Image: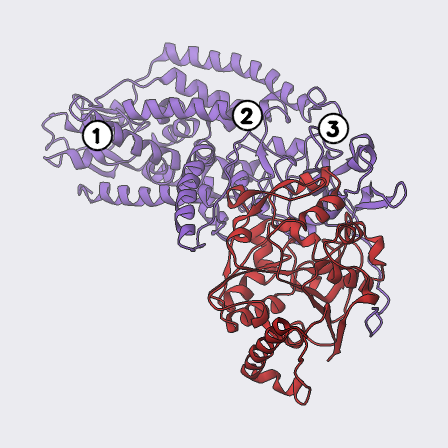
Amino acid sequence: MKSSALKHIRTVFSALVLLLFAFLFIDFRGILGENTFGPILYLQFVPSLLKFIIAGVATATGFMVVIALTLLTGRTYCSFLCPLGILQDGISRAGGLVKRRFRRYGYKKPYTILRYFILVLTAGILLLGGVYVLTILDPYSTFGRFMTYFGKPVVLVINNLLAALLGKFDIYALYRVDIKPFELAAYIIPVAFLFLIGFLAFRYGRLYCNTVCPVGTFLGLLSKLSLFRVRFEEDKCTRCGRCAMACKSSCIDFLNKHVDVSRCVNCFNCIDSCKENGMSYGLVRLKHKEKVESPADASRRSFITGSLVLLAGGTQLVRAQNTNVPIPTKDSTVKEDRLYPVSPPGSIGLASYTSRCTACALCVTACPTSVIQPSVNEFGFAGIMQPRMDFHKGFCNYDCNRCTDVCPTGAIMPLMMEAKQLTQLGKAVFIKDNCIVSTEKTACGACSEHCPTKACHMVTFEGNLLIPEVKDDICIGCGACEYACPTKPYKAIFVDGNPIHEAALKPETKKLETVPGDFPF
Amino acid sequence: MKRRNFLRSSVGAGLAAGAFMSFGRYEKALAGKPLPAGANYDLVAVMGGEPAAMFDMGIQALGGMGTFVGKGQKVLVKPNIGWDVVPEKGGNTNPALIRRIIEHCFRAGAKEVYVFDNTCDNWIKCYKNSGIEQAVKDAGAKIVPGNSESYYQEVTIPNGKKLTKTKVHELVLSSDVFINVPVLKHHSSAMMTGALKNMMGVVWDRAYWHRNNLNQCIADYALYTKKPSLNVMDAYNVMMRNGPRGVSKEDLSNMKSLMISTDWVAIDAAGAKMMGKEPSSIEHIALAAGMGIGKMDLASMNIHRMKM
């Protein structure tokens, strides 16, 4: 196909995908239904891969579709389906507007060693059981963090201004939402990548995708075998170079009439830019094949050696992560002696959870009570940003299993409501010396008030005073008691995580005696 | 009878009669019974009907809603919507009752009726699953969020012992009439929740109350100048244990009752009795009565009891 319609179709399609994914993460009113997440996220490469291979979910075949698509059409994924890639197109478009007269992409050599090194490092460490490099580099998760950490607060500010304005006219269709920041250290990686990706996209188009992104590099390898490609129409090309200037991937060597297919993301801008119809997208022509490969044996060898060395080092890192999970967090608190962090319902246990989660933050943003918060070092340093249950920020709503509906990697597996209500994430631990009833000798019981199973119940203390007591076997570790406890800075009741989630017993119920049919006054 | 009282009750009776006639459906239920002339009760208690029908009867005995709500006024109806539970679990005020109260307000000429609560569970889920959001919308009133601190303004509590300042929802300040509609329940902290305790849902920082002598704070808040004109206590399905959230439906006692009073200490005292407790054993009721906020001695009250 030579028509520039291709480019326009791509632009419209990818803009819609970008909007959809942005909405997925910004949807603070919980408009998207529980069954919408699966289909939307099905084709995201890394989540699907992890869900299929590590979590063993046989239906998570999206990554196979992407591989097949790439073998057929090249890196279509990167321009049509990857929200981070599309976001970068937006940024580089903005860069083009600012520097319209100066900015030209032009052909550049690939950073071959760097990109394959990153790919092998990521894959190698993943094979050894460490997900943390992927956590940092997975494009979908990076995009998710951008939206959750930066995009959503901006939208909330606008929402709150509008809500305040409408409120003046007695209209409450919009409501204000308090913006609560995460812990500061959780922002380090998202902020660094915002600057890195923002800068690279603004100045150099898809350089990040073709140098850093392991998915881009992997699909680039596959696309060397693809059937359909962007190609030169040799008889029509006048070597004017417009195509190369328009190429966000800087992968068109117009002098040699050669497109580096491993970096081409099928944006079709080149086809659109060519006045002579000298570029087209279609079945691969075999004679190009010879030119495509430009082997550099020396660099390949050093790359392979380097990768092996790194793999060896990576093993150590993996070990470090495995022994570090779960990490006791004794140092910072004196009285809340939490031995284990608490992972979300459906995550089965700390080890399986931390080996599957890429910290895309979708559960963080979807959680209606904000109890799911990015961790800092609760899961160990390698688990930074992987969400944990933070009962100082919220508690797990008894009749809610939204996080188990949204997780695309299988880190949080689906959990039916009834099963969720009997899944014990941890156990409440009461610290009498912190409790108002004991220290102030006044009534409190906020913990028991909030407890959905009455595992935390009130027993006689002194005089008429009642004091909490916890029944472990019916406690589900929802953290309502900890959240509601009014003591500062340490709570008088807290949930200590279960390293492997356990089954709680159902609270016993007894029939009440019938009531008298008359007023007792 | 003082002239003022006579006028008030006559007007009340007139309005009530008007309201009564317009509720065609309930004409039968009340047919033959004389309209209350005095309407000077400390407490009206109704038993044996559905919540909405019991309210129709009860408010009638107090002279109708027109006694409390004037033409063109802004009314705040404050139910308990604290928990993300369905109406059958008795954790929140009955939605049908809320709907009927709103309808009475509009019939009495209210310009606008608002409903909100500062919930314990996630507020969106509470509003929705309690059935109250729908009931409010069906009745043509406005359900207002209470989830953000920016909706709350600081006020001072005159003569509060422990609670001297607190942030209350802007609707409490901006409404002309305030109707308090608690649901009667067992409560693990305050022993019982009723009219006085329901005010923990109009303030922002409840934890402060818990830290600073909960029962005293509950009583102190009742000193705040903006008091409910009317308290309606839903005692239809009363949670007798495991309150205030409840664990199962078996915690409920189907009392099919409703109390109405302008005295929120009196209505709480009646609630305590309904739950089989002495009012004086509920600390915040005893404290409030001791501070002169209302009466808790049920024997000395003019109580109008009705059965359906």
Amino acid at dot 3: Glu
Q: Which residue is mark 3?
A: A336
The residue drawn where x is 46% and y is 26% is A190
Q: Which residue is mark 2?
A: A132
Dividing the picture into quarters, in which one does residue B198 lie? bottom right
Is the residue B124 above or below the residue B210 in the image? below
Is disc 1 surrounded by few (<14), some (14 to 19) or many (20+) residues within 10 Å? few
Q: CA distance from mark 3 to mark 2?
A: 28 Å
Chain red in the figure, letter: B
Is disc 2 surrounded by few (<14), some (14 to 19) or many (20+) residues within 10 Å? many
Disc 3, SS: loop
Residue found farthest to the right: A463
Decide if residue A478 is in sight here.
no
Amino acid at dot 1: Leu
Give how far across and how far down residue B61 sits, in percent: 67, 76
Give how far across and how far down residue B240 sits, in percent: 80, 60
Residue found farthest to the bottom: B32
